[in-house]
Image: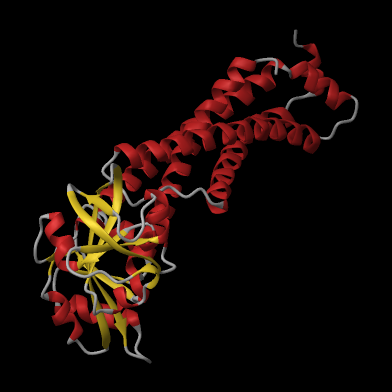
Amino acid sequence: MRRRARSLLTAVGVSLGVGLIVALLSISAGVQTTVNGIIHLGGADFGVFQGHITDLTRSQLPEGLATQVAAQPGVKAVAAIKLEVTTVDGVDSFLVFGLNPTEFAAQQFVITQGTRPTGNQVLLGDHAASQLKLGPGDRVNVAGHSLQVSGVFHSGNTFEDGSVVGPLALVEQVAGTPGELTSVGVIVRAGVSPSQVAKQLEQHFPGLVSVTDPGQAVQIDTTSQLLISVGWVFGIVALLVGGVGVTNTMAMSVMERSQEIGILRAVGWPGRRVALLILAESMVICLLALGIGLLLGYIGAQVLVAQGSLSALVSPIFGPSVFAWGLAFSLGVGMLGAIYPVWRAIRLSPIQALRRE
């Protein structure tokens, strides 16, 4: 409090590193949640995608691949999936799924209003219907195509329930990519390991990636992988610089308060109590940095997702684990930054300290 500007600047320096790490962890959690919803679409055990792509939504697979995958050992059923992120009734980044009406991904829908689609009709998830304020018989504009709504469904999958779902051929036509799928959902036979079948498919179809674990998303999505890798480097560098700042601030504080520390030692304060005093002050600075860092991380994550090339499906998730990591990093920096000032303070002789002016 005696050097408010210096303490605040130190806290801001540490907060930059904390903010970067919080932003990256929240984006990573959002990617995993998104992929978890996509790979288990319609109750699938896992999904297959094109490998080495910048974004999972940019995956392009030939429509005939679904039939080939269905013929592989251990595969019980498949579902061809076309995913398009487009404008629906003036709402940007809206999800549109193309599904084969006879496959499991479409059959598991519970129709709550209207009927299943025929021809160029589409279904609305109940969340999407509420958002767009549309129902059976209304028309919805999907990427410039006016389509009739045949009914409203519920599936229990957040992404499906907030989307428009149409016949596979229709959505391929709307997307301008006839014969191209985004993914193939796979259900394996009873008693067969999904991971084993996934490896077999990757070996049989080179260039194909089977996603069984949402954590694989960052490894497959090259844009996310690059962003997170570079971000971790900058985050760690920022934390190291912040640690140096904490060390400098606390060391200067010890020097300026040498007489005060000398008096405390002279009246009986043991070295460990003086050490705890310095450490506590360092922790206070880093807790202030945590508060600023969480705010910066929240803003940074939203900006990176909105302005970057990440999928429009991804929303940052700020869960307890993200806060815990931010807290751990900030307190870790505080402890490391206090090592030298603490050492200097406990080695300070009371007599020498009291002689200083």
Front one among 107 and 139: 139
At a point 14% along the width and 81% down the height, the residue shown is 68
At a point 70% along the width and 30% down the height, the residue shown is 281
Instruction: Identify whether 50 is placed above or below 7.
Output: below
Q: Quadrant of residue 343?
A: top right
Residue 298: x and y in percent read 48, 38
Residue 258: x and y in percent read 74, 18
Tell whether 350 sits left or right of 105: right
Instruction: Identify whether 180 is placed above or below 346.
Output: below
Instruction: Identify whether 122 is placed above or below 115.
Output: above
Q: How is the image coloured?
A: secondary structure
At a point 26% along the width and 86% down the height, the residue shown is 75
Residue 174: x and y in percent read 15, 56
At a point 10% along the width and 75% down the height, the residue shown is 64
Instruction: Identify whether 107 is placed above or below 85.
Output: below
Front one among 42 and 132: 132
Tell whether 55 sits left or right of 151: left
- Asked whether residue 311 appears in the rendered view, the answer is no
Most distant residue in the front direction: 137
Which of the image's four quarters has the N terminus? Answer: top right
Front one among 121 and 202: 121
Which of the image's four quarters has the C terminus? Answer: top right
Number of on-image labels: 0
Q: Quadrant of residue 31?
A: bottom left
Residue 70: x and y in percent read 20, 84
